[in-house]
Amino acid sequence: MNQRVGTDSSPLRFAACESASLPLFATFIGARRRAPPARTHRQIGSQLVGRRILAAMGGLDSSSMETDLDRPNIEEYLTTETIREVPKKLHLSDLLDISPTLTEAAGAIVDDSFTRCFKSNSPEPWNWNIYLFPLWCLGVVVRYGILFPASFSWLVSFSNLISCMFCRVGVLALGWIVFFAAFLPVHFLIRGHDKWRCKIERKLVEMMCSVFVASWTGVIKYHGPRPSRRPQQVFVANHTSMIDFIILEQMTAFAVIMQKHPGWVGFIQKTILESVGCIWFNRTESKDREVVATKIREHTQGVDNNPLLIFPEGTCVNNHYTVMFKKGAFELGCAVCPVAIKYNKIFVDAFWNSKKQSFTTHLAQLMTSWAVVCDVWYLEPQYIRPGEIPIEFAERVRDMISVRAGLKKVPWDGYLKYFRPSPKLTERKQQIFAESVLKRLEEI
Amino acid sequence: MGNASSMLTQYDIEEVQEHCNYLFSQQEIVALYNRFCQLDRTAKGFISSDEFLSIPEFSLNPLSQRLLKMVDGLNFKDFVAFLSAFSPQATPQQKVELIFKVYDVDGKGRVTFKDLLEVLRDLTGSFMSEEQREKVLGQVLEEAGYSRESSLYLEDFMKVLSKAGLKMEVEVPVD
């Protein structure tokens, strides 16, 4: 990293890549504010802060990045007049005028790009007149009464079994029975022939996912070449809900990296997903990152392992935006195959707002809607380019996925949903302001 | 959920508009109401400090704690009245009044040297020592004709900041 600072082309190239995303960032922060015509030190300072925020959000190692950022690449931002200009004398009005800071705060209160990513968009009510309303009532009857009958009716009498077989819960229940009837013997009895066991378990998991998809009448269109099993590759996709994994798993058995959940989901994770080779992480543990990074590296190097699927956003986003990708998947030195997933909102909003509903409620909502329609695009495998750092690589892949799925990019870290921003970011703003005051103080 | 503006009647909108001195249009008030409901996750009728701090951009702001004292627990009418100083239609006097209120957060009606020091501390953090801050403030106050012991009133703020040309505007996104 330090060597790059010395070479001629790379810092500027880095600045160019950063500045490509900085206007985007500045647009989001500044979009709701009328831009004043003259540029003051403070505005230049806040652009520098913006660049630093961008770097900090990407989770870079602070020390080496700071040497890059502290170098005066600000020639790009300063006009020639302001370079020649001597810092003006400090007046009381400069210290009393806190309007830029207040404007930023008010702009954030009125609209901020981070909260927009997690807004569940309620569908426009369409059943508002006399002939549409009865149709809607009929729809409710069909969806709740026929497509999703309570499973107790199936338990009551076997004669209902046939009618329920055409119904979703019935399909799901039957699917689970068949799955466990096959999986448990295979898992526990076929001990010797590991390769066979893995193959069968993989097929069973794929089948179970197809049953899941059928239970919500999933209509999924896959575009692009089917993923092949090779070592030294990792798949990354944008994340909207836990069903993303089920949709992708239906086509190919992936190993996935997931947060451990409580309840019945956790039980499934422990028993079934272990067989496809999953890696667990815990957001709340700080040392977790290195441990997980090592596990990922080992997995990609193993020849027999299932291809690894990673959701670099780290959290569920509402399928209109993408938040910043974590660089963990991009610094492994292997091929990264992007996958873009886009749900069709007309049928159902597949965003799992984990703060508002549990996964069970979310699944129930999916099962009582008409269909889950989505498009999945398997994009061309990408390799890290010479001189590109993992953050840039992650941004490049995020760009590809966002463009393909028609999502807008947002320069925030998804983990801000759970944690407050680091105080270092506020400290950088304070540092800029303090330095400008001190410099002008010397002129007095 | 549905459309939030259906919960606001025309009468409510007009009352809020009157309270903020007609600085926001009716569409902007509806948009602000949607935003208010989005931030007030538990539908209490006001936004708590925690909910404000969950906006990362707001949390990053050096003056966030001071502003929180002003906006914590405001109902929708007062929320709009607070934001009205940032409307493009607001007069410079209204903007200066808000800045004065940020300095005079305990509402004494005057701003002392201590208040000025506190705000400067928020803005500069650990990157300036306390002596440096006192020195800077002392010098600029003297230059403007005040002393450390004098308190600044609203008229003083108006006088000092009228030349500054305040740019304090926020655009409300109307769908």
Image (spheres, coloured by chain):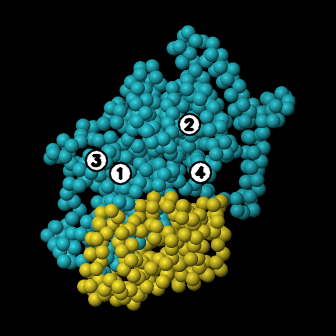
Chain colours: A cyan, B yellow
Question: Mark 1 — on which chain does it sit?
Answer: A
Q: Are marks 2 and 3 in contact (CB under 8 Å)?
A: no
Under circle 1, the secondary element is helix
Please give the residue where the numbered disc 1 appears in the rendered image.
A56
Q: Secondary structure at mark 3?
A: helix
Is the Cβ of the residue at disc 1 closer than 8 Å to that at disc 4? no
Distance from the alpha carbon under mark 2 to that under mark 1: 27 Å
User: Do residues under tags 3 and 4 come within 8 Å of each other at their CB atoms?
Assistant: no
Identify which residue is drawn at 45% across, 58% down. Answer: B56
Q: Position of residue A390 (x, y in %)?
A: 32, 40
Residue where numbered disc 2 is placed: A260
Q: Earlier in the sequence, mark 2 or mark 1?
A: 1
Q: Do the residues marked 1 and 4 share a common chain?
A: yes
Q: Which mark is residue A63?
A: 3
Mark 3 vs mark 1, foreground winner is 3
CA gap between label 3 and label 4 equals 35 Å
